Image: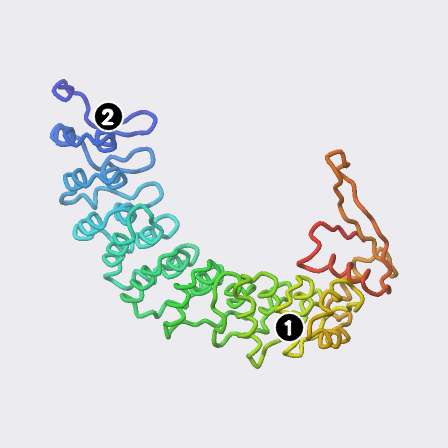
Amino acid sequence: MLLDRQIDPNYKHPEDQRTGLHEAIQQGHSELIPVLLKGGAKISIPDADGNTPLVYAIMYNRIDEFNLLLGDGVIESCTPNLNQATLLHFAAERSPQMVKKLITAGANPAAQDKDGDTPLFWALNSYECSEKDVLKIIKQLVANPDTIAVSNKRGMTAWHVAAQGSRSSVVKCLLQYSNGAEIGISNAAGETPLQIATREGNTEIANLLLDCPLNDIIPQPTASPTLLHSAIKKCQILTLQGLSVQDCNLSGDTPIHVVIRDGDPAIVEKSLQAFLQRVDNAINMRNNAGKTALDFALERSNSHAIELLLKHQASAGLEWVEEFEVIQRWSSKPWFPALREALKLGQVSPQSAPLLVDSAWSRDCVRIRKEIYIDEDTPEEAYAEIMVPCTVRSPVRRIVFKILSHDQGKNYLCHS
């Protein structure tokens, strides 16, 4: 009736710029769409975000309305929105049927939005539809394998995006449609898909990538943490070929340090056994604070790790006193004599000595503060303070090293 009275069918709301066709699709009034189209409504008019009515049909999964609007020349008339996302980008998140129709109509699977993401990226990140539908969408988008190698503005390819997710079936699908030549490409942050999968703890995906013969798993020399460091924290990939357990992160920690400090308790012993069988086991390498793996194990009272390390001639990096409680607790263990011998090798290392000297109140002593809390009436600035001579032996100097190290004493403040 309104159209009979010469009402403009393409009138746009002053705020969101939506037309009657946008509204009819969003609200699911499919019976109004033929009326509006017959009255002259245009399907190419964008709203304030640049989205056309056909985009609305895709976003709200209106398959009947989508089929009604999709016709000859529609792909060309419906320009990308303000984020440069095309009809195929939106469909790739939601519907394999819509993706198939759009590709048949001439939509470009390699089109990139403002971030450089292709419809394949949108599909890989989608949780709008089932995993089964996602796989159907991917198979249609990668009919041309070159789309897998397209990178966005962050240097990410489809491999990187798939490695971030938790769907191993998606990676299997990509492997099926690609020769894997681009699987070892690094993104702008210098990470390969394998490194991302390892960092995210996606063990199954990481193992799939490892099985690809064209995958380069050797990290860059400057990478920190290395692939092996990340694997220890999140995965159970323990013996990657070509990776050295002597590689250090920015704190100087080797993978052996990290497995004791951060590894899942369920895999610490298994990890250590795998590492210690290596020729380059680095068992006595010190981190930037002068600590060896044995120091880490002693600090954490990890008896299994201590015993295993001692079997492989581990030694302490710092000076310990045998009478110290953290040592005496193991006096009943059969390996205690070996521990005593290992502690005799501990000494101030060239790496850790400057940490102590640089934090000194003078060349002779260090002032140590520790924030304290007794009850709710404790002043906010309350702290305990002690002046420690640099030459004093453990256990007092042991406390100093705990404070200055990278992984201990987070509540301590050391002032120079």
Residue 369 spot, x, y in % from top left: 79, 49
Q: Nearer the viewer, residue 291 or 266?
A: 266
- Mark 2 neighbour density, 10 Å: few (under 14) some (14–19) many (20 or more): few
Which of the 4 image quarters holds residue 317?
Answer: bottom right
Classify 9 as above or below 81: above
Which of the 4 image quarters holds residue 203?
Answer: bottom left
Which of the 4 image quarters holds residue 292?
Answer: bottom right
Residue 360 spot, x, y in % from top left: 82, 58
Q: From the image, state whether disc 1 or disc 2 is nearer to you.
A: 1
Tell me the kind of residue under disc 1.
Glu
Quadrant location of the N terminus?
top left
Task: Identify the element where label 2 is drawn.
Answer: loop
Task: Identify the element where label 1 is drawn.
Answer: helix
Residue pointed to by mark 2: 11
Residue 49 spot, x, y in % from top left: 34, 36
Classify 309 as above or below 365: below
The residue located at (18%, 43%) in the rendering is 74
Residue contact at pointers 1 and 2, CB within 8 angstroms: no
**Which callout, 1 or 2, points at the residue further toward the start of the chain?**
2
Q: Spatial distance from mark 1 to mark 2, Cα to Cα?
A: 79 Å
Residue 398 spot, x, y in % from top left: 78, 62
Q: Which residue is at the far bottom?
A: 279
Tell me the kind of residue under disc 2.
Tyr
- Mark 1 neighbour density, 10 Å: few (under 14) some (14–19) many (20 or more): some
Residue pointed to by mark 1: 307
The residue located at (59%, 77%) in the rendering is 281
Total numbered labels placed on residues in the image? 2
